[in-house]
Image (tube, rainbow, N blue to C red):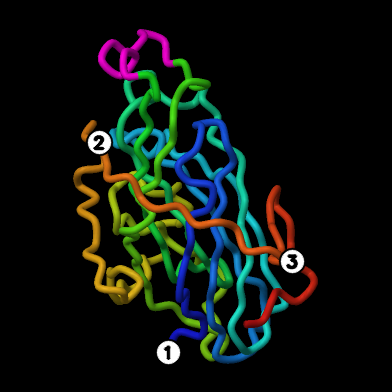
Amino acid sequence: MAKVHVSNVVVLNNPCEFNTPFQFEITFECIEELKEDLEWKIIYVGSAESEAYDQVLDTVFVGPVPEGRHMFVFQADPPDVSKIPVADAVGVTVVLLTCSYRGKEFVRVGYYVNNEYSDPEMRENPPTVPQYEKLTRNILATQPRVTRFKIEWDDKPAEAGTSAAAVASLEDNSMEQNADSNSSPPTLVETTGFGNGTNPLDYSRCGESNSLIDPSSTLITPGISTCASNDSLSAPMEVI
């Protein structure tokens, strides 16, 4: 049984300019106190063609995590544009929010991201060299795809020498491979939305250049801690 359940993620500051930091307000429940920290990552998929263009925008270790419901804001800088293929600068891609415990990923939240020029003329005749300062980033916040994996928690410690394998549940290029030949991928439990009736996204379409529906934006809630730049939450988070 999972000891941590992500109950909601709110995309903040959306839509916005391409070079604006990503912000996610994360709410999760812990059914009992964890012995080790939770590792959260924000990953930007630079190209649907190869995982080599995936960028881990930031990593934060959250802990200690007592029993209860918690909420915090995870902020990360925008992707390094020099690592994005020119052909994939404009159009639809994916951003991933993952969480791991003891090196094992147990939940992944994926969103479509549409990057397009705000100027109608530039949309009709895009420049050969991408002008990122004129791009608008729009995350399809109303249709997350939540993928959960079964892992071993504190009850059954993993054997020495094993490591978590990257699982391409959303698409083959969703995160960096970090597993050795002796490890096996975690067991997929389910892939859903947040239980609000939203249909999961078809991530096989992540490389297409179609426009997305404008999602409604949500304002940041005052008084919530913001984590960024490989920080570790040493103080307790806000308990709801």
Q: Amino acid at mark 2?
A: Ser
Q: Amino acid at mark 1?
A: Met
* Of the two numbered discs 2 and 1 in the rendering, the one whose residue sits closer to the viewer: 2
Q: Quadrant of the N terminus?
A: bottom left
- Residue at image x 38%, y 39%? 51
Residue 234 position in % (x across, y down): 79, 69
Of 172 and 60, which appears nearest the observer? Answer: 60
Residue 52 position in % (x across, y down): 41, 35
Question: Of helix, strand and loop, which one carries label 2?
Answer: loop
Q: Which residue is mark 2?
A: 211
Magenta segment: 120-130
First-in-chain label (2 vs 1) = 1
Say whether residue 203 is left or right of residue 155.
Answer: left
- Residue at image x 52%, y 51%? 42
* Of the two numbered discs 3 and 2 in the rendering, the one whose residue sits closer to the viewer: 2
Task: Quadrant for residue 227, please give it.
Answer: bottom right
Residue 115 position in % (x across, y down): 38, 32
Residue 150 position in % (x across, y down): 38, 78
Q: Which residue is mark 3?
A: 233
Q: Amino acid at mark 3?
A: Leu
Say whether residue 114 is left or right of residue 198.
Answer: right
Cα–Cα span, label 3 and label 2: 37 Å
- Residue at image x 40%, y 61%? 109
Question: Of helix, strand and loop, which one carries label 1?
Answer: loop
Crowd tier of the residue under label 3, counting other residues whose Cα lies within 10 Å: few below 14, some 14–19, many 20 or above: many
- Residue at image x 32%, y 19%? 120
Q: Which residue is mark 1?
A: 1
